Image (cartoon, rainbow, N blue to C red):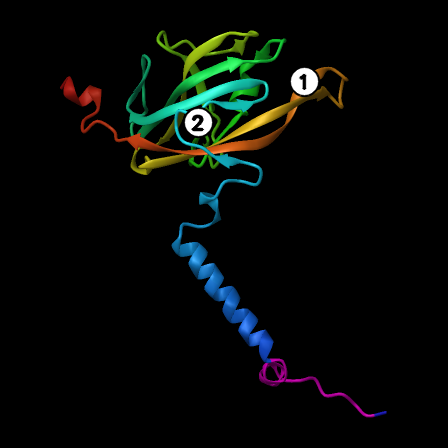
Amino acid sequence: MPTRIPLAPGALVRTHPWLSLGALALVVALAVVTLTGGWSRSAPEGAVQVAPGTEVDAAPFSLRLDEASARFVRGDEDAEPGQAFVVVEGQVELTSSTSVTATTLTDAFRADLSGYDLGGSATQDPAPVVSVVPDGSTLLGLGPGLRYDVQLSYVVDEGSVPDRLDVTVLEHTRRPSALDGELRWFDATPVARLTLDVAPLPAIRPAEEDL
């Protein structure tokens, strides 16, 4: 029985020229995606691109995000040195017949932003602090039919404040917990995505103005 000698890589390409063309096409595709900003700019599967100020139904909420700005002060809290807040303003209403905790609300947003979690640790997926306008109190829960003017705020490095912010809105499904059988909101699924222009930081921190 004759012995088969493995083909050298060059011989394989000569024998099957489509391999070379396929590799070239893949390189070109990757280059185009990179130049246009990557896949992260497109809406996640199932999410519809909407304009700021659009009312979005994202069970158990009806919500709207209007504008974003960078700030050194959030309510009565100053940002730590070298850090700043990115604040998104909007409205939210609970459309469910039962109350929910603020955790379900914060899980309804994914901002394309590197920042810090509530414990001060760096993260690629920071959860927002949701506060009520105008008193600045932290929203700990929502009751049926209640509508709030809110601010979603993220802590970021001062030097990484974006010019534009992409936010994905997610809806939840109410079903029994696998642990205790109690009905809760699970399975966050993207339904909408929007891009907000971020108003820049003030030129001077408030503490510096007082010096």
Residue pointed to by mark 2: 120
Of residues 28 and 62, the one nearer the viewer is: 62
The reply to whether residue 205 is visible in this rendering is yes
First along the sequence among labels 2 and 1: 2
User: Residue 173: percent from the left, percent from the top?
Assistant: 66, 24
**Residue plotted at (59% across, 76% down):** 18
Residue 190 picture quarter: top right
Q: Is residue 146 above or below residue 125?
A: above
Q: Amino acid at mark 2?
A: Gly
> At 25% across and 29% down in the image, what residue appears?
201
Q: Amino acid at mark 1?
A: Arg
Q: Given this view, does label 2 or label 1 mark the residue nearer the observer?
A: 1
Above-or-below relation of 24 to 157:
below
Q: Which residue is mark 1?
A: 184
Farthest residue, direction left: 211
Q: Which residues are magenta?
A: 2-16
Residue 87 visible in image: no
Quote the CA–CA distance across marks 2 and 1: 28 Å
Q: Secondary structure at mark 2?
A: loop
Disc 2 residue crowd, few under 14, some 14–19, many 20+, Cα 10 Å:
few
Where disc 1 sits, the SS reads strand
Q: Is residue 15 shown in magenta?
A: yes
Q: Position of residue 83 (x, y in %)?
A: 32, 29
